Amino acid sequence: MQSPATEEKLVLTILELAAALNRRGDVISEQVGITTQQWIIMLYIYGDPNIPYIGKKYSADKHFQHNAGMLASDIAEALNVSRPNITNIINLLTAKELVEQQPDENDRRRKILRLTPKGIEVLKRIEPFRRKANLALFSALSKEQLEATLHNLEIILQILKRVGA
């Protein structure tokens, strides 16, 4: 057995943190009848500007509109998961009437995803729970600590995306 190294401990702590955040997300999302995965996909489709992929894609666009539409392939790329995985979740959300698919005007083979009014309402209902949970989670950290943590995690994410891991 190897002796603990900071890098390994950090990776394992992040993995444990991700699992704990998923469990917390399940508790929150169950209140509106969806899963954490479905909630995250809905946030992508809606265009939540706090999502790194969305922020990068639209930061220069002064005319950003929520729910303007997104492709399943873009979500799969951003989350580094397979397109069929995203398609399965989209199909469940469509069956729940939370997401609709419309043909892309430029390429009829591609489907643009948008939240339905019911889907937007689900996100609005879940938002207060999300805010409360996040405030409680980060209350022990100063603004400077939060910003430094975010900055460091963004650097790590960029490295991972560059190497294709």
Image (spheres, grey):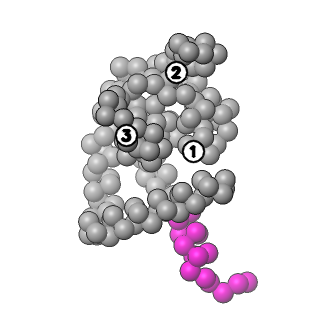
- Please tell me which residue is depicted at 55% across the width and 28% down the height of the picture: 71
Whole-Å distance between the Cαs marked 2 and 1? 18 Å
Tell me, yes or no, whether the two marked residues, 2 and 1, touch with CB atoms within 8 Å.
no
Does the magenta run of residues contain 137? no
| Crowd band around label 1 with a 10 angstrom C-alpha radius: few (<14), some (14–19), many (20+) | some
| Crowd band around label 3 with a 10 angstrom C-alpha radius: few (<14), some (14–19), many (20+) | few
Whole-Å distance between the Cαs marked 2 and 3? 22 Å
Identify the mark nearer the N-term, 2 or 3. 3
Residue 9, percent from left and from top: 57, 76
Tell me the amino acid under the disc marked 2.
Ile
In this rendering, the label closer to the viewer, 2 or 3: 3
Disc number placed over residue 28 in the picture, else none: none
Residue 24, percent from left and from top: 43, 52
Disc number placed over residue 79 in the picture, else none: 1
- In this view, 113 is above or below 10: above
- Please tell me which residue is depicted at 30% across the width and 45% down the height of the picture: 129
Tell me the amino acid under the disc marked 1.
Leu
Asked which secondary structure carries label 1, the reply is: helix
Task: Give the overall secondary structure of the magenta segment.
Answer: helix
Magenta segment boundaries in residue numbering: 1-15
Identify the mark nearer the N-term, 2 or 1. 1
Tell me the amino acid under the disc marked 3.
Ala
Disc number placed over residue 60 in the picture, else none: 3
Residue hosting label 2: 112
In this rendering, the label closer to the viewer, 1 or 3: 3
Residue 125, percent from left and from top: 30, 34
